[in-house]
Amino acid sequence: MEEFNGANLIAINKKGVFVTPESSTILPSITNNCLIQLAKDRGMVVERRPLIFKDEVETWTEVGAVGTAAVVCPIKSLTMGDQTWSFSEDAKTLQGLFQDLCKIQRGEAADPHGWGRILTMD
């Protein structure tokens, strides 16, 4: 599994590690890159690597679809065939990363990475 329709996949595993696919077949995501940096800022371990869905899905506690429009959309469950995996409904880690990024985007928090630009109209 590499991505959702129009969104990157991210997951938080039982060890609190932020995992996201590394692949030449998916487009790079600025939003995902920002969330990776914010996860590192929080002291989280980040792993960007090929994901083996069948081997790893059981270890995921939170899953999200990441993209420009939604920023982070927590995923409640994934189904393959007759098997369904459910994830944390409150998705506290993903919600925290979402809030961190949105605060920076709105100018409500410091922008330590220089992502924003101040635009003026003359």
Image (cartoon, rainbow, N blue to C red):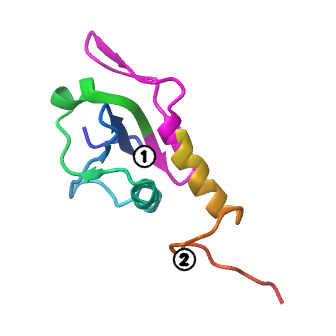
Residue drawn at 57 percent across, 56 percent down: 101
Give percent across and percent down for residue 79: 33, 19
Residue 52: image quadrant is: top left
Q: Is residue 71 visible?
A: no
Along the viewing direction, whichever of 60 and 16 lies nearer the viewer? 16
Q: What is the residue that sits farthest to the bottom in this orientation? A: 122
Whether 12 is drawn above or below 87: the answer is below
Q: Which residue is mark 2?
A: 114
Q: Are marks 2 and 1 in contact (CB under 8 Å)?
A: no
Of the 4 image quadrants, the one containing the C terminus is: bottom right
SS of the residue at dot 1? Answer: strand
SS of the residue at dot 2? Answer: loop
Q: Which residue is mark 1?
A: 7
Along the viewing direction, whichever of 65 and 49 lies nearer the viewer? 49
Q: Is residue 109 visible?
A: yes
Q: Which residues are magenta?
A: 65-94
Q: What is the residue that sits farthest to the front in this orientation? A: 43
Give percent across and percent down for residue 96: 55, 44
Give percent across and percent down for residue 23: 21, 54
Residue drawn at 63 percent across, 78 percent down: 117
Q: Earlier in the sequence, mark 2 or mark 1?
A: 1
Whether 122 is drawn above or below 7: the answer is below
Along the viewing direction, whichever of 63 and 90 lies nearer the viewer? 90
